[in-house]
Structure formats: C-alpha cells, structure tokens
Amino acid sequence: MADLSVEFAGLKLKNPFIIASSELTNKVEKIKWAEENGASAVSTKLTFLQIPLYARPYHIIEKGGAFYSPSGERMQVERTQELIAQCKEQTDLKIIANMMGPGEDLEGWAKLGRMLEEAGADMLELNMSCPNLGLMAKQMGVDEEPELGATLGKDPVLAGQVCKAVVDAVGIPVMPKMTPEANTMMVARSVQKAGAAAVSAINCPQSLPPLDIKNGGHPMYPSTGNQSFAGLCGPWIRPLAYRHIAQMRTICPDLPLAGGGGLMNWRHSVEMLMYGATVLTYCSLLYLKGYKAFAKIEPGLRKFMDENGYETLADMRGIALKYIVTPKEVDYIPMLPAIDLEKCNGCGLCAAPGHCECIEIIDGKAVLVDSKECYSCAVCYFLCNREAITMEKAPIEETRAGVAALEK
C-alpha cells in the first residue's frame, strides 16, 4: 500500500493533507472534524496582536468554480493561544498558526510569533498574502494602513526582513505564505535565505465579483451595501497555483512547499504534487462541499498511487517539471480529431468554435470536412461531452499547423 507519510520542514505528518487558514479553523470543534476526515494538520485562522479592522465572513459563489471572499473573521492572539491549547489537548493534529504582524514593526512580528509558539504551535505561517488587507488600501491611495498582507508579500526585501525577525525569535519552523500578486520566485528565494523552513502558496488573487445589473451596479452580496476587492478562491485559481508552485520548485529545489489553491479532488492533489508541492492545502473544497468530499481524497490518492506504482509521495513529486519548456521549445505533435459516429449525437458543440473551419454537422453527425484547416488545437476534443472525439497522430502535411511548420 502507498505510503502517504511525509516530513515537512521538520514536522512528521501521517499524510500531506492540511486545512488552510480560514473559518474552517477558528474553533476546536471544526478542527476535530478536520482530523476525523483525514487531515494531518491545520493552519489556524489569521491572528493579530491587535485586529486592524472589524470584518465578518461574506462570500459569493458562481456556478462553475468562482468563490469570492472579500473578508473574513480575524482573531486576537489571546483567542488563538486558547485555541491552540485546546487543539493540542483534544487532537493529534499538527497545529500551524497563521499570523500577521504589525506592518514593518519587526519586533511586533517577533512578539506575535513567540506568543503563538508558547501556546504550543508546531509551525508559524506568516501571512504575507492576504488580498483584503493593506494591498487594497495602497491601490486606492489610502495611507493609514501599515504594510500588511499582499503589500508586504510583493516586496522580497521586506518579506525577507520580516521572516528573519520571526525565525530569530522562535524555535519552531517558519513558513511565509505567498501572494500571487508577486513574483513568488524572488520572494521565496528571499525568505529561504532569511531562514524560512518552508513556503506556502498561494493565497487568493484580487478580483471583483459580478454585479446586480438591474439595480444600478449594486453588489451581488445580499448582506452588504457595498464591497471591497475580493479574494478569488476556488477551482478557477488552480492553474495559477500550479504555475507558482512549479516556478518556486524550479528556483528553490530544496525548499519544502505547501501547495494549494482550488484543489477539489484527489486528481488535483496528484497534479499539485507532480508540479512540486511537498504537502497540500485545502479550503474551497470544504466551504463548497464539506468534509465528506474531503474524506474521499485519501482513498483516491492511495488507489492512484497503488495502480501506477508510486510507493511514496517523493516518487511523483515534481515529475511534471521536465515537461515545462520555453515557448520556442514546445514539441508540437500534428494530430487530427477522429469522430466516433456511433457516439456522436450531432449536438454541434465541436463545430461551434469561431476559430475552427474544419468540422461541420452533416446529416446529424460531426464530420471533419477539411483536415488541412485543422490546427490540432483539440478544442473539439475537450468540448465533446459524449467522448465521441479522440485526437490521433497524423502526417505532418495533413494539418494546417503542420503545413505552417514545414513552410518555416
């Protein structure tokens, strides 16, 4: 049977599954649910020495994968200390304390880190990435906020200074959390030099949700009269998370990475591992589908590993990186769609794309009418919901893309 255990920045975990800092991790009762459904660690809700502003959770969800989260509860350090103590008494989970210090006040960061360590935290996660704190104020020309969240995380020098201050102040591993608003390769390299034991990525990119267009552009949120820029969560950010993990793994090959952002099932988890993550973090899945969905990830991952000959997580970690090349190095394979007429119902999805001139619906069936107009783009393959189209290798001179390549 596949071995899911992993050593992550000095923490020995029974599996790579970590619940990300959120309203999922602000009470011991919820954290117990995490353990019951297979998690090995949790990152507690964002903690401050002094909460900078009042906020309550409010979200909007679009079908298909967008989960906008403009705000959320923040925790005073004394409350988090109590929560950590409860978790250490009542669970066997590793407890990661997500924290944000007072801007450029390095001693404030150090003080907060020491307080959380004294409470029993196993690791500190330095929030340098919250899209709803600091960054928005800067973008709107508001100077009253200190350097918080994604504002701090975009500055490799400041991020390194903050990381070093906390590393020097505590004896437990320190893990900065990256913002996708930054060049995470540079920031990760900076904090690694400053002593970071690991890096977590990604937090949410900034966004704005849809509007109530029949009400003068009023926000869609039923529980607020206005809105701030929102953190975009959920499946739609997963490709962005893959990119950042792969880039950081490439430039920091020995740095432990916690990879998350829109992971919704065991397949996504495998992909994140193959892009270079050491452990995995989950949030939107549990918001949208609950712990029953989360509990399916471990058996799914084990089955995949057993069926494909992976004995440990290290066997597949980063194996996809060798296929990432520069645009001029891409190996284009000439292919044409092969249509199974028995499966095809003539729905027309494959013939609809505006860029395509090679597929038509004739007598109720999809037909490849001109292979030499085919770019081998495979859009039709991905659109077909009846699996009636497969992509098959073709002689290079029979596809438009192939002919163009030969003419170079």
Image (tube, rainbow, N blue to C red):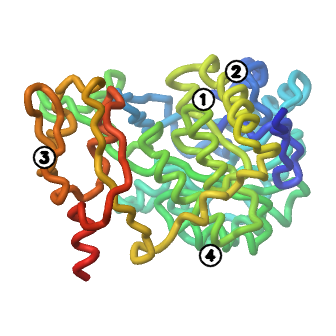
**As shown in the figure, which amino acid type bears the numbered disc 4?**
Val
Mark carried by residue 369:
3
Q: Residue 339, relative to residue 103: is it above or below?
A: above
In contact (CB < 8 Å): disc 3 and disc 4: no
SS for callout 3 = loop
Question: SS at mark 2?
Answer: helix
Give the mark, 3 or 1, whose residue is nearer the N terminus: 1
Q: CA separation, marks 2 and 3?
A: 57 Å
Count residues near mark 4 (Cα–Cα under 10 Å), then give few for <14, some for 14-19, many for 20+.
some
The answer to which of marks 2 and 3 sits earlier in the sequence is 2
Residue 140: tell me if it is visible.
no
Is the C-beta separation of discs 1 and 2 under 8 Å? yes
Residue on which the image places disc 2: 30
- Report how far apart the C-alphas of labels 4 and 1 lie in the structure: 31 Å
**Nearer-the-camera pick, 145 or 310:** 310
Frontmost residue, 327 versus 376: 376
Residue 61 % position (x, y): 38, 28
Q: Give the answer, above or below, for where 129 lies relative to 33.
A: below
Residue 381: x and y in percent read 32, 41
* Residue located at (47% from left, 37% from top): 234
Q: Quadrant of residue 232?
A: top left
Q: Which residue is mark 1?
A: 23
Q: Secondary structure at mark 1?
A: helix
| Disc 2 packing (10 Å; few <14; some 14–19; many ≥20) | some
Q: Which residue is mark 4?
A: 157
